[in-house]
Amino acid sequence: MFPLARTDFIPVPHAYTSYHEYPTMEAHYNRSYFARTLPPVPKNCPTPFGVAGKKELPSAEELANKFLKRGKFKTDHTNTSWLFMFFAQHFTHEFFKTIYHRPAFSWGNHGVDVSHIYGQDVERQNKLRSFEDGKLKSQIINGEEWPPYLKDVDNVTMQYPPNTPEDRKFAVGHPFYCMLPGLFMYATIWLREHNRVCTILRKEHPHWDDERLYHTGKLVITGEVIKIVIEDYVNHLANYNLKLKYNLELVFDHGYDYDNRIHLEFNHMYHWHPFSPDEFDISGTKYSISEFMYHPEIVIKHGMSSFVDSMSKGLCGK
């Protein structure tokens, strides 16, 4: 009943954005940027906080050095693993999608649409589909299923440094999910899971065509993502010793309706760079951050099982 109890605290329609200190229709309908939970300080106020506090705030550089710059690595007291860290980054970037040439704007859909797995739009999704039995394109390397090479998928935009070898360039749902092996790991896990689900659906419903198998598989994956987020991710993150459960039947007899919108405050909260260790130990081989970046082939080198095992044992910083 937790979501029902919170409905009175959720403003619908969403009232504020950074562009106006008063409620607007823009805040609810213009999804090209984030809404706000609290209104911005009105213009012409005597201090940055309104009427109280200092008249001049510290510089961004000073704040970054004081609060974000790392001295000595310290392990987080909640025993948070690297597996959790990369899950957080992989999951949240389905709705945190900054347009870098227009940094105040977002190209995300503000909700759990699994676009980080399948692609942002139909054009990209279709390029990643095999159009056989509802499955996504994949390849077998060392006896395991992996995303296809970028060269084998037509015109899918991915972010790679210049001169990256072709055998280190893969095509997945999100343009930068090959930047770190941990993100590539989750992209591969969800690809495998989608194709596994479609195999089961094909056996249960042999009369279904490719299109229905694909979209039904996508619905199943969406449910799995939400279940993991609520029952594992949020349970650990909240650290309240509560056992949250994902049970849709709780709202079947209620007039429960919720339209998600990402708020600026929520986006600010997700700056967890101190989680990252100084180096990653993968099955006894140590990689610095620079050696880890843009090397998705590290997952293939060690194999999925060994890589996931190392991710689950490594501890994040505080």
Image (cartoon, rainbow, N blue to C red):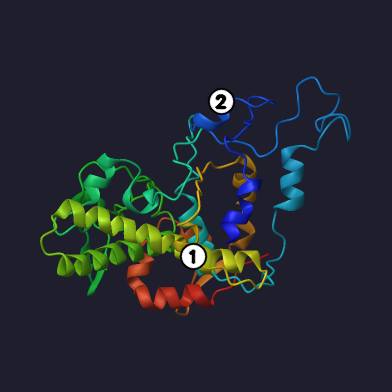
Local packing at callout 1 (Cα closer than 10 Å; few below 14, some 14-19, many 20+) is some
**Where 154 sits versus 165, above or below?**
above
Q: Residue at x 76, y 24 (%)?
A: 42
Local packing at callout 2 (Cα closer than 10 Å; few below 14, some 14-19, many 20+) is few
* Cα–Cα span, label 1 and label 2: 32 Å
Amino acid carrying label 1: it is Tyr
Q: Residue at x 30, y 54 (%)?
A: 169
Marks 1,2: beta carbons within 8 A: no
Q: Residue 31: where, in percent of width, then height? A: 49, 33
Q: Which residue is mark 2?
A: 25
Q: Relative to residue 276, is residue 185 drawn left or right?
A: left
In this view, the residue in front, 224 or 282, is 224
Q: Quadrant of the N terminus?
A: bottom right
Numbered disc 1: secondary structure: loop
Q: Relative to residue 62, is residue 179 drawn left or right?
A: left
Q: Residue 197: where, in percent of width, then height? A: 26, 66
Q: Residue at x 10, y 60 (%)?
A: 207
Q: Residue 101: where, in percent of width, then height? A: 48, 30
Which mark, residue 246? Answer: 1
Q: Quadrant of the C terminus?
A: bottom right
Q: Residue 233: where, in percent of width, then height? A: 54, 65
Which residue of the protein is positioned furthest toward the front in this rendering? 253
Numbered disc 2: secondary structure: loop
Amino acid carrying label 2: it is Met
Q: Earlier in the sequence, mark 1 or mark 2?
A: 2
**Where 240 sits versus 47, above or below?**
below
**Where 241 sits versus 195, above or below?**
below
Q: Relative to residue 247, is residue 58 drawn left or right?
A: right
In this view, the residue in front, 209 or 289, is 209
- Please tell me in which quadrant of the rendered image residue 314 appears: bottom right
